Image: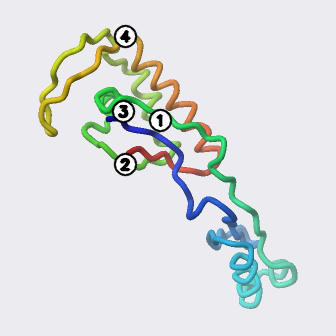
Amino acid sequence: MSITFAAAIIATDIDVFRLTCESGEVLGEFVGHTNAYTEGDLHALICADTLCQQYGPEILPLPAAEGLDEVNMATDNALDVLAVLGLPGQHEGEIPAALLLDRIDTASAIGFDDAERPEGLAYGPLGVMTTAARRPGYLSERLAALRTLAHACATADRTVVWH
């Protein structure tokens, strides 16, 4: 069993557009070119902003999740990483990328046990689980990989999900 951390997928992750009024107000995100432009035209009819009335709102495509790597770990390692991040026992979830970056920085500043772990048995809410051995420094390596993912997600305006 494993847990994978990845960028959240927006709708079908294709042809998603964000509309922004000339006044700066974000009007929403719409799937499909036709939907976006129809909504833009409708908004221009009722908008009080002169530029928006003349030219319509700004319509920009959102970046796709393509090129955003995933970070996969054995379940027990992922649960340890989540505990270090202050999210213990959460086998699946979602977090804004900026908040994940903050949690990684906090965990790194406070410090955590990143010692070697021998193979053994662990008893938890899901029952008995055989834990894999883990080399020293493994959690730090995984946090660095999550930092890279979270930074890419923040740049692409995505949340980070795990399952």
The earlier-in-sequence mark between 4 and 1 is 1
**Which numbered mark, 3 or 4, is in the foreground of this view?**
4
From the viewer's side, name the closer residue of 106 and 7. 7
Q: Write down the residue under mark 1.
A: 102
Q: Which residue sits at x=14%, y=33%?
A: 124
**Which numbered dot is residue 81?**
none
* Numbered disc 3: secondary structure: loop
**Label 2 crowding class (10 Å Cα cut-off): few <14, some 14-19, many 20+?**
few
Figure quadrant of the C terminus: top left
The earlier-in-sequence mark between 2 and 1 is 2
* Numbered disc 1: secondary structure: helix
Q: Are marks 3 and 2 in contact (CB under 8 Å)?
A: no
Q: Position of residue 72 (x, y in %)?
A: 45, 33
**Label 1 crowding class (10 Å Cα cut-off): few <14, some 14-19, many 20+?**
some
Say whether residue 101 is left or right of residue 87.
right
Q: Which residue sits at x=58%, y=63%?
A: 12
Q: What's the residue type where badge 2 is placed?
A: Gly
**Label 4 crowding class (10 Å Cα cut-off): few <14, some 14-19, many 20+?**
few
Figure quadrant of the N terminus: top left
Q: What's the residue type where badge 4 is placed?
A: Arg
**Which numbered dot is residue 93?**
2
Q: Write down the residue under mark 3.
A: 85
The earlier-in-sequence mark between 4 and 2 is 2
From the viewer's side, name the closer residue of 134 and 50. 134
The earlier-in-sequence mark between 3 and 4 is 3
State the separation of the CA atoms marked 3 and 1: 9 Å
State the separation of the CA atoms marked 3 and 4: 19 Å
**Which numbered mark, 3 or 2, is in the foreground of this view?**
2
